[in-house]
Image (tube, helix red, strand yellow):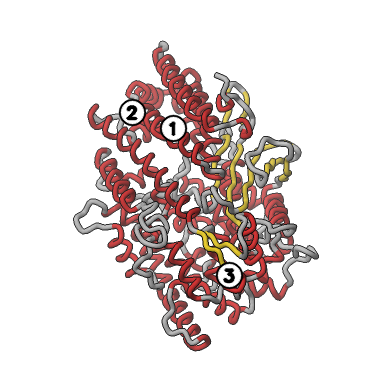
């Protein structure tokens, strides 16, 4: 077939891929894989790694290399034609995954291999891959009766479609809302935000300024804009996206999708013998039981909520005493918090921004990686790109290439919000040839304006470090089996460890000396400003902690209690807010309708993973605090035990190998400024 998605290339040929290539390529590879797996199983036994599992991995990798650029483009360069092609393939991929997971002969071949005496002679990564596969066969319903197997497949296919529709609705709702305003209406906004709003208007051929629901537009309005009515309008549009209320009420409504998704997940869990979807979710995670997760989140809430309440009282008192506002609304919180931060610490994000031009921060990030792991990062040119803003880099050690990554930094229309890392190529060995890993790293930071480069906020810098931490986990793996290479096979509640871990260097004076540099002079953050920034690091940290715990508890309880007579989405969210939240929510708030992490991503009954892994990352960094934040021996230990190991061993044993003991919650509370 003359189809670029079927060609074998080191990197994707983005410029040659069109939506009409997608369905034929995916269909061809699925049918080819099914036929070839049947032939492999029909060969005389006994089956071995070399005769069965390695060839199947080769087939799977070809399908992955076909689908990877399609999924990436759907996220960063969404169009109607591409979306249609992408969505047309989801049922096929879901059916294929179910076919594999429920293939009795394939399961028996894996089981026979695991039960043979010479299984112990296989390398650790191969044994782990086989054991994971046997677990996944069971979780795919391989032992179910025929009718229930069929129902399992129908459920998975429908859930795949619904998750994609949920994400599409959020993207469409985000793109649908804009507001044309004058510069006068944006009084109080920093120059960088005004310039971005003017540029957005110019790009649409409009006068004045244009506001959107992309984060780099929403954030400065809520944080700095003096016009309270405008803040309310932007806030309301943002928290009602994809719902039955708000400016686009009912147009992209996810309400019914949420109900259907939860019902199907509960049915799926029941088919597999779990009481609820929370239990099914934990089958592949570090946490032992739903009770353990609830206890963990509740403990964190108990430790942090008193401080959060005190911070909220201080904010309300400040707004009343200093600004005459007695009734603080959600659209006032960021605005008056920023004023309180500036009064308390005499520092604002906007003062720091000129010291964080994007290329200086990138160079600083690469310097951190060089000091910790002895690596060099070089930018490559002349590659086949999909957008002028996409960049390509190579990670090297002593001149030898280890990995590559695409970097797509800036917010734009038709690009999904948020930030993420995804796999383009996975490190694996086949026929004696080593395939180097390639990652996609995506952010939505403020874009350059005119001749001025992108100037990052402190939060945007931290997000960039976070995603690069994920990227290092994918790219520095030393595993040679795809199923446990990089983040593959890593317990989902440990997968955030390397990303949150790397964030710590954003707040180390020794690191900030070379991460920061004024956009005009190159001078690093002045000592006085640096001191203020670090002093303000944990401003309202209690409020931030309970906000994340609200999301995590809502997600987990929703998947634990769904199906019980009294359970409703809004009701459970209201209950959780009553227990842990300190900020009031307006009745129109439909946070759940845009919660793509759990309804369109991989975090269902798993959003707690962010806090769970934050305990791991804070405790891991505490060792660097003890031994030196750029101690190369400690860096190489983290690289060896965590980054290189991938999913080849269970996450707790890897952590213990690095830390010498199981994780402790205290470093997280200390780093977060939560009083003991």
- Observer-side mark, 2 or 1, equals 1
Please, what secondary structure does the residue beneath circle 2 have? loop
In this view of the protein, which residue sits in the foreground, 594 or 377? 594
Residue 134 visible within the image:
no
Q: Which residue is mark 3?
A: 537
Q: Which residue is mark 2?
A: 102
Q: Is residue 263 left or right of residue 404?
A: left
- In the picture as drawn, the residue positioned furthest to the top comes out as 44
Q: Is residue 573 left or right of residue 181?
A: left
- Residue 32 image label: none
Q: Is residue 40 above or below residue 290?
A: above
In this view of the protein, which residue sits in the foreground, 227 or 126? 227
Name which residue lies at 53% across and 26% down.
62
The N terminus: image quadrant:
top right
Q: Which residue is mark 1?
A: 89
Residue 138 visible within the image:
yes
Q: In the picture, residue 530 is in which quadrant?
A: bottom right
Name which residue lies at 44% across and 72% down.
330
Q: Earlier in the sequence, mark 1 or mark 3?
A: 1
- Local crowd size for mark 3, using a 10 Å CA cut-off: few (<14), some (14–19), many (≥20): some
Q: Is residue 33 above or below residue 208?
A: above
Q: Is residue 524 left or right of residue 207?
A: right
Residue 331 location, x and y as percent? 46, 72
Please, what secondary structure does the residue beneath circle 3 have? loop
- In the picture as drawn, the residue positioned furthest to the right comes out as 521
Q: Earlier in the sequence, mark 2 or mark 1?
A: 1
Residue 668 location, x and y as percent? 50, 63
Q: Is there CB contact under 8 Å for labels 2 and 3?
A: no
Q: In the picture, residue 118 is in which quadrant?
A: top left
């Amino acid at each position: 077939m003359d189809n670029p998605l079927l060609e074998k290339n080191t990197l994707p040929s983005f410029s040659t891929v069109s939506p009409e290539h997608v369905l034929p390529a995916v269909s061809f590879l699925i049918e080819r894989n099914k036929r070839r797996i049947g032939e492999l199983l029909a060969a005389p036994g006994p089956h071995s790694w070399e005769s069965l599992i390695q060839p199947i991995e080769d087939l799977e990798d070809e399908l992955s290399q076909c689908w990877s650029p399609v999924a990436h483009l759907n996220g960063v360069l969404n169009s109607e034609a591409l979306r249609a092609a992408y969505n047309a393939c989801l049922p096929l991929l879901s059916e294929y995954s179910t076919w594999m997971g429920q293939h009795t002969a394939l399961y028996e071949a894996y089981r026979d291999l695991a039960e043979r005496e010479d299984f112990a002679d296989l390398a650790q990564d191969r044994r782990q891959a086989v054991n994971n596969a046997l677990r996944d066969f069971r979780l795919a319903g391989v032992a179910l009766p025929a009718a229930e197997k069929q129902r399992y497949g129908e459920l998975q296919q429908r859930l795949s479609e619904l998750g994609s529709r949920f994400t599409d609705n959020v993207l469409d709702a985000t793109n649908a809302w804009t507001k044309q305003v004058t510069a006068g209406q944006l009084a109080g906004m920093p120059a960088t935000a005004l310039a971005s709003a003017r540029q957005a208007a110019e790009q649409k051929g409009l006068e004045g300024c244009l506001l959107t629901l992309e984060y780099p537009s929403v954030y400065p309005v809520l944080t700095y804009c003096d016009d309270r009515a405008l803040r309310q309008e932007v806030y309301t549009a943002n928290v009602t996206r994809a719902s039955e209320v708000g400016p686009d009420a009912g147009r992209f409504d996810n309400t019914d999708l949420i109900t259907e998704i939860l019902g199907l997940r509960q049915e799926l869990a029941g088919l597999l013998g779990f009481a609820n979807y929370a239990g099914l979710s934990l089958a592949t995670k570090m946490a032992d039981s739903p009770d353990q997760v609830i206890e963990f989140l509740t403990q964190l809430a108990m430790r942090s909520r008193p401080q959060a309440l005190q911070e909220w009282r201080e904010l309300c008192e400040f707004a009343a005493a200093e600004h005459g506002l007695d009734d603080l609304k959600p659209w006032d919180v960021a605005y008056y918090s920023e004023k309180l931060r500036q009064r308390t610490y005499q520092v604002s994000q906007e003062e720091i921004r000129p010291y964080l031009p994007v290329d200086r921060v990138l160079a600083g990030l690469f310097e951190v990686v060089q000091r910790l792991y002895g690596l060099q990062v070089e930018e490559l040119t002349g590659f086949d790109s999909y957008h002028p803003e996409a960049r390509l880099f190579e990670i090297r050690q002593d001149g030898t290439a280890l990995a590559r990554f695409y970097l797509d930094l800036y917010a734009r229309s038709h690009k999904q919000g948020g930030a993420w890392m995804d796999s383009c190529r996975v490190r694996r060995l086949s026929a004696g040839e080593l395939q180097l890993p390639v990652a996609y790293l995506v952010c939505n930071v403020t874009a350059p304006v005119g001749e001025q480069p992108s100037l990052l906020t402190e939060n945007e810098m931290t997000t960039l470090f976070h995603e690069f931490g994920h990227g290092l986990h994918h790219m520095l793996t030393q595993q040679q089996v795809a199923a446990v290479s990089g983040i593959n096979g890593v317990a989902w509640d440990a997968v955030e460890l390397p990303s949150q871990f790397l964030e710590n260097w954003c707040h180390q004076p020794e690191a900030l000396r070379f991460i920061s540099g004024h956009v005009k002079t190159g001078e690093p953050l002045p000592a006085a400003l640096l001191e203020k920034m670090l002093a303000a690091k944990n401003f309202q940290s209690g409020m931030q902690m309970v906000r994340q715990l609200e999301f995590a508890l809502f997600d987990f309880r929703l998947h634990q209690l769904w199906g019980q007579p009294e359970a409703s989405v809004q009701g459970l969210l209201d209950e959780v807010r009553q227990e842990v939240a300190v900020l009031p929510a307006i009745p129109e708030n439909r946070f759940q309708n845009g919660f793509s992490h759990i309804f369109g991503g991989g975090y269902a009954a798993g959003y707690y993973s962010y806090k769970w892994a934050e305990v791991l990352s804070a405790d891991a960094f505490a060792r660097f605090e003890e031994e030196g934040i750029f101690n190369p021996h400690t860096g190489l230990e983290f690289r060896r035990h965590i980054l290189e190991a991938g999913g080849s061993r269970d996450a707790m044993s890897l952590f213990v190998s690095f830390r010498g003991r199981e994780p402790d919650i205290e470093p997280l509370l200390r780093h977060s400024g939560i009083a003991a």
